[in-house]
Image (cartoon, rainbow, N blue to C red):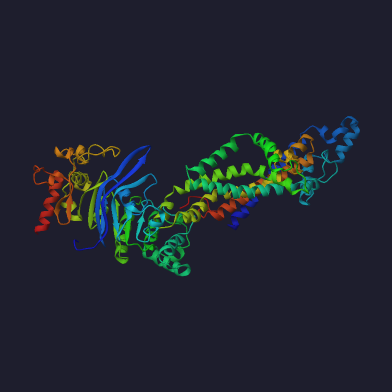
Amino acid sequence: MEDRKVILSVRDLVIKFRLRGDILTAIREASLDLYEGESLAIVGESGSGKSVFTKSFMGLLDANGWIDAGSIIFEGEDLAQYKIEKDWLKIRGKKIAMVFQDPMTSLNPLKTVGKQVQEAIELHQGIKGEEAKDLAISILEDVGIHDPENRYKQYPHEFSGGMRQRVVIAIAVACNPQILICDEPTTALDVTIQAQILELLKGLKDKYNLTTIYITHDLGVVANVADRIAVMYAGDIIEIGKCEEVFYNPQHPYTWALLSSLPQLGVKGHDLFTIKGTPPNLFYEIKGDAFAPRNPRALKIDFVKRPPYFQVSPTHKAKTWLLDPRAPKVDPPESIRVLRQQWEVGNNG
Amino acid sequence: MLKYSIKRLLQSLFTLFIIVTVVFLLMRLLPEEGYFGDAYEKLDEAQKEAILTNMGLRDPMHIQLMNFYKNLIKGDLGESITFRPKVPVMEIIKDKVPYSLYFGLASIGISLLVGVGLGIAMARNKSKFWDKFGTGYVVFIRAVPAAVYFLFKQIYITGVFKLPMLFKIDNPKTWILPTISMSLGGIASYAMWIRRYMVDELNKDYVKLARAKGLESKKIMVRHVFRNAFVPMAQYLPATILFTIAGSIYIESLYSIPGMGGLLVEVIKRQDNTLVQALVLIYSSIGIVGLFLGDILMAIFDPRIKLQRKGGAR
């Protein structure tokens, strides 16, 4: 992975929102390198900033939000400096496309499904009319819609939820982007459909040569599709690494807590693990490690100084003082120890 | 679609039949003095009875009703009794409709053009100058009684622009003020509704998707938002247009326009039963046809409206 080309590089990004006269810091100096052709999952609880973070790559922040500092380097240009719509039109769809969470409302109810796909094609692929229509039909077929010639003429209300999400994906693919951001693409769908949609996205990634970012709070989704995982908490990426590394050898106490809450890791007869407390109030400045107040294993320094990244392996790093050589030895929860053992056994054998 | 239209048409005819019958029967319950107008005092009982019998008002009720419908099918709505005695009802109405129709259509045209334009400007600049300006206008027009600002207009605008007050058919300058006066209210409601529906649409997810796929905001407004916002308004458009035939009581009397406005009130006061019946028939037909056309228009615009079958959308 190290030798792969970085396609998008975010450095110390700060995003703020004005809400009823107060200023909220949604993203706190987050950094991320996205490699060409990879599939990255950003996980975190509601309000951790994962959506806002990726929306800023496309200039889709709500009107009361702005990029306060930092840079987003894409193809030699700093997207953080883009101010007017004309600049963003070079990026939106053309380079980076997005699939939204709720397929029931993401389509215009009064336009045929085919026309909405065709609109994206005509916008970005430089073809019009019949030719664009034929391409639209073939993309509809690619996303797994049967009888695409007839479905082209139908309206969104004639499609089920899963089918609509396929259409939303078709629209994103029709833009012919380099990066595809999927913002909770399966959250609104039922479980059997979820698996189909993820399978579809994996297939399209290869066929259309896409770099994909999944935003999700469902670790099951992550395990299915991601090469790498970035764990987000209170507007910062606190741990990032290859899928197996984060799953089996997590370093940050928040990642421990997140994994321990998985029902699959619970012990029969015991209560499911829950993370105590609530995420920090982003209206106030956060001191030290944002997770410290909810962390029973927090060190003194966690409340004073914000930890930098500590490298665990060339591909794995985490922002926790526990990785500092001077830190005392702190044992992770039992479920995490079990995971580590499995990991070590797997690596040795 | 065709099946639905026919079904709705038959339903409409049935509604119309009920309205007209009920009104016809109610009219028969009114005191009989009205049929004689000023001559009432001078006639003796036998003469009155003769006149009433002659008019067919002494026939049994169902015969009267049958006769009324027979004439109606032939297109004969009867003659005026007291308003303009012995003049066919259709004649009276025919003279008045063109004025009301002209002013009505002109004002709808202006209202749509200016009102929708203002509404779009308000929605695009939400909470900024145009929105505040438009809201101010809408609140003013809707809250202040029309008489107040019409009076203001009478005094100042006629003076400043040297526009004549009263309507004269051969002087085109006199057509201006009534047309503008009639448009003021329409502009306010179209602006208000377009703004409201557009702001609703703007907050929907499909607008976000359209933005994310790289459509510029002007095109999003035209291709997606405005079109969808106009659908709920389309439903009421045919009825609004048709009702201009009825004229505006206030404005027609203010500028002495010989239109339809106020005719119904006038003939009820004079107890001109045939004219009342004819007008009720016309007004209710307009209402019913207007709603019918509105539903059809809506169904054409909005594919989600399933016309044939009842039940859920999916």
User: Considering depth in this image, is A112 or B7 the residue closer to the camera?
Assistant: A112
Q: Farthest bottom residue?
A: A131
Above/below status of A319 relative to A213: above
Above/below status of A263 relative to A244: above
Residue A119 x/y as whole percent: 45, 61
Which image quarter holds the N terminus of chain B? bottom right
Q: Is residue A192 visible?
A: no
User: Considering depth in this image, is A133 or B313 the residue closer to the camera?
Assistant: A133
Image position of A28 (left or right of A82):
left
Image position of B47 (left or right of B274):
right
User: Considering depth in this image, is A213 or A27 the residue closer to the camera?
Assistant: A27
Image position of A261 (left or right of B127):
left
Residue A334 x/y as whole percent: 13, 44
Residue A6 x/y as whole percent: 24, 60
The residue drawn where x is 35% and y is 56% is A98
Residue B285 x/y as whole percent: 69, 47
Above/below status of A265 relative to A201: above
